[in-house]
Image: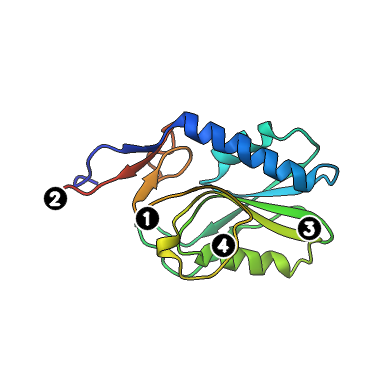
Amino acid sequence: MSSQTEPRILLTRDEIAAAVRRLSAEIGKEYRGKCPLLIGILKGSFVFMADLVRSLDFPLEVEFIKLSSYGRGRESLGKVSVVSGLTSPIEGRDVLVVEDIVDTGITLSFLIDYLKKEKPASLRLCALTDKPSRRQSALTIDYLGFTVPDRFIVGYGIDWDEKFRYLPDICYLEDEK
């Protein structure tokens, strides 16, 4: 990390809050009256999911799953594994996956296929950020906060090697030349 400059703000906390409000309004149109199960992908989505849940004004349930594909580096290892699985059955449920960032799409494609085997009534994806320039697996993001450039982002729950989650804004790390 010694070759890193300080994190630079990409999206402010106010921009993030506005996106959360917009997303909750969009999600409300789909799920009001249905009591959906929101599945957060740990660890990165926990801040976004907490804000999103507080912004929704209808009954819902919350579940978490922990997947691994990054290790300690900046590049996905390409092989996804379930570190901690679901504790609630999802068969016949309306399920909304909540993710902090869609990058290569490998992890989310794995998760969507994994969840489809459990036969939910519906399965949708909500992502705070999307980095389509790095996509390797095709997938549909039903509710999207922001499209971001191909930079390594941190903050608002998103980390680099467990660092920077505490930042209230979404920032990027830039290598020094």
Crowding near pointer 4: few (<14 within 10 Å), some, many (20+)?
Answer: many
Q: Nearer the viewer, mark 3 or mark 4?
A: 4
User: Is there CB contact under 8 Å for labels 1 and 2?
Assistant: no
What kind of residue is marked 3? Answer: Ile
Indicate the position of residue 77 as horizontal and vertical percent values.
Answer: 41, 67
Q: Nearer the viewer, mark 4 or mark 1?
A: 4
Looking at the image, which residue is at 78% across and 41% down? 60
Please report whichever mark, 1 or 2, sits nearer to the chain's N-terminal start: 1
Q: CA distance from mark 2 to mark 3?
A: 49 Å
User: Disc 4 versus disc 1: distance between alpha carbons?
Assistant: 19 Å
Q: CA distance from mark 2 to mark 4?
A: 33 Å
Place residue 119 in its image quadrant.
bottom right
Q: 118 or 72, which is in the foreground?
A: 118
Query: Nearer the N terminus, badge 1 or badge 3?
Result: 1
At x 33% / y 44%, what residue is drawn? 172
Instruction: Locate residue 69 relative to residue 1 in the image: left or right.
Output: right
| Disc 4 secondary structure class | helix
The answer to whether residue 24 is above or below residue 126 is above
Kind of residue at badge 4: Leu
Which numbered circle lies on residue 4? none
Residue to which mark 2 is pinned: 177
For the residue carrying disc 2, how many other residues have a C-alpha within 10 Å: few (<14), some (14-19), or many (20+)? Answer: few
Q: Is there a contact, CB below 8 Å, between mark 2 and mark 4? A: no
For label 4, the residue is 108
Q: Tag 3's secondary structure?
A: loop
- Seen from the viewer's position, the closer of residues 82 and 44 is 44
Q: Which residue is mark 3?
A: 90
Q: Is residue 160 visible?
A: no
Q: How would you rate the neighbour count of disc 3 (Cα within 10 Å): few for under 14, some for 14-19, many for 20 or more?
A: many
From the top left corner, tell me how far across and down residue 121 is, in percent: 81, 61
